[in-house]
Amino acid sequence: MLPITLAIDSGYKTPFNAHFLLEKATVPAMPYTRPKGKPGFFRTKDFIYDEHYDTYICPNDETLLYKRTMPTGHRLYVSDGSICRDCPLLSKCTESKDAIKQIRRHVWQDDLDIVEDLRFVDTIKKQYKMRSQTIERRFGDAKEQHGMRWTRYRGHDKVSMDTTLICAAMNLKKIAMLLIKGPVMV
């Protein structure tokens, strides 16, 4: 049996979603997301994570030690300010007054790293590319042709009824187009 592949928008590219999908034996096809941070400063990928010692190693070969796990599921790693204060790379590392660099790593970051590596597999690339031709087109059609940019009603029940009618109309349109084209030869 082939694994199920699921193409996901960048807004859903989180460690939790990556972990959940991999646990369910579903291959997530997630897009590239630009690293966050100030230009000219080191990014997290410039620091090397050492799994064995559970530490980060900075570009100047100093160690950032684990401090605590935050309620959000991120593990906090901090540098020693007394060492960093005299570092020649400090201006590219942090603006902290205490000269302390902090890095947050989610407990499921390994799953997100696996998903990031899967992004380069040819079948995953094709699957993600299909997303723009299938589901994105449906959303665009719903917004432009069927007025789904804004709701015309108030309240969950009325909005749900309106959305159901619009989806039914879109499905009827799709069926009509298939009937016009005739049977598809496989």
Image: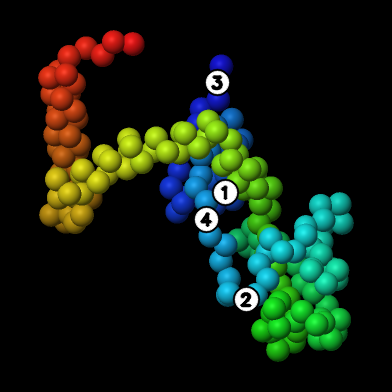
> Which tag, 4 or 3, sits closer to the chain's start?
3
What numbered label is drawn on residue 2? 3
As shown in the figure, which amino acid type bears the numbered disc 2?
A: Gly
- Determine whether label 4 and label 1 are within 8 Å by CB: no
In this rendering, the answer to whether 146 lies above or below 154 is above
Q: Quadrant of residue 65?
A: bottom right
Identify the residue at image location x=75%, y=67%: 77
The CA span between labels 4 and 1 is 16 Å
Q: Are marks 2 and 4 in contact (CB under 8 Å)?
A: no
The mark lying in front, picked from 4 and 3, is: 4
Which of marks 1 and 4 precedes in the sequence?
1
How far separated are the C-alphas under marks 4 and 3? Answer: 27 Å
Q: Secondary structure at mark 2?
A: loop
SS type, badge 1: helix
Q: Gap in Å between the C-alphas at discs 2 and 3? A: 44 Å
User: SS class of the residue under badge 3?
Assistant: loop
Q: Position of residue 101 (x, y in %)?
A: 73, 76
Tell me the kind of residue under disc 4.
Thr
Q: Residues within 10 Å of mark 2 (few under 14, many from 20)?
A: few
Eye-nearest disc, 2 or 1: 2
Amino acid type indicated by mark 1: Phe
The quadrant of the rendering that contains the C terminus is top left
Q: Which residue is mark 2?
A: 40
